[in-house]
Amino acid sequence: MGLQNAKASSGKRTNILMLGLDSAGKSTLLYKFRYKDAFLTMPTIGFNVDMIDAGKGFTLTFWDVGGQKKMRELWSNFLEGTHALLYVVDSSDKRRLEESRREFELILKSDSMKNVPVVVLANKQDLPGALNAEDITRRFKMKKYCSDRNWYVQPCCAITGQGLAEAFQRVATFARQYSKSKETFTTLKELNACQGFLSSTSGDS
Ligand SMILES: Nc1nc2c(ncn2[C@@H]2O[C@H](COP(=O)(O)OP(=O)(O)OP(=O)(O)O)[C@@H](O)[C@H]2O)c(=O)[nH]1
Ligand SMILES: [Mg+2]
């Protein structure tokens, strides 16, 4: 990215990647937030992409990728260029919690996801026996795996919409901060390269 571009975009357009096991509620919560309506969803084969205007020229692009086992093999293709990860968990599905945690750990370990901020959504809080945000924080070892990045665990219910506005607000803020810090880094790198070039060419004549 050139200096001009870095300045012009300055966190205005960010990519939010939504991942989580199949049936966690990714598509339901995206539609609920977007259209204020609970839609009947089908399992996502491939991905949905939706742009949300966050005002003042800020745009969030949501990548909602299917979570079925065969879809997870494709997740690695979506990681690059992500400014924040929205990881959705079915808090009532204790049987698959460990499977979800393992997938989460794999994503975070990827080079492309280094320092990328994370919001974990402890979804389906309306269901009996759902684990709360503290339980999910502990079970997902958030403090261990997210020590090098911004992170937050938000309880929510995609059907009623409870907790969604907070989650989207938080993920937007994280993404913007991350995007800006990355641009500053790129600019500094370019300035360094420039200085290196100038000092290598100076004194030649
Ligand atoms: N009770 C309850 N059901 C929910 C909630 N969120 C989603 N669901 C239901 O869970 C099922 C799966 O939701 P989806 O949004 O399709 O799940 P997904 O994560 O997009 O699944 P894939 O596309 O297969 O990755 C649907 O029947 C939803 O109605 C919730 O907060 N509470
Ligand atoms: Mg889906």
Image: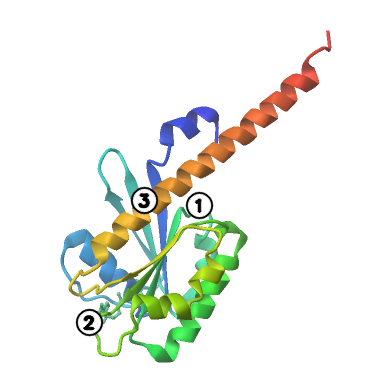
| First reached walking from the N terminus: tag 2 or tag 1 | 1
Residue 107: horizontal and vertical position, in percent?
A: 54, 68
- Residue in the image at 43% along x and 79% along y: 68
On the question of residue 50 being in view, the answer is: no
- Give the amino acid type for the residue marked by disc 1 in the picture: Gly
Who is closer to the viewer here, 160 or 71?
160
Residue 4 drawn above or below residue 40: above
Residue 142: horizontal and vertical position, in percent?
A: 49, 71
Residue 184: horizontal and vertical position, in percent?
A: 53, 37
Q: Is residue 182 left or right of residue 160?
A: right
- Residue in the image at 43% along x and 47% along y: 177
Q: What element carries label 1?
A: loop
Residue 205 drawn above or below residue 12: above
Q: Mark 1 points at which residue?
A: 81
| First reached walking from the N terminus: tag 1 or tag 3 | 1
Q: Name the residue under label 2.
A: 126
- Residue in the image at 24% along x and 60% along y: 165
Q: Is mark 2 within 8 Å of ligand 1?
A: yes
Mark carried by residue 49: none
Q: Mark 3 points at which residue?
A: 173
- Give the amino acid type for the residue marked by disc 3 in the picture: Thr
Who is closer to the viewer here, 142 or 168?
142
Q: In which quarter of the image is the N terminus?
A: top right
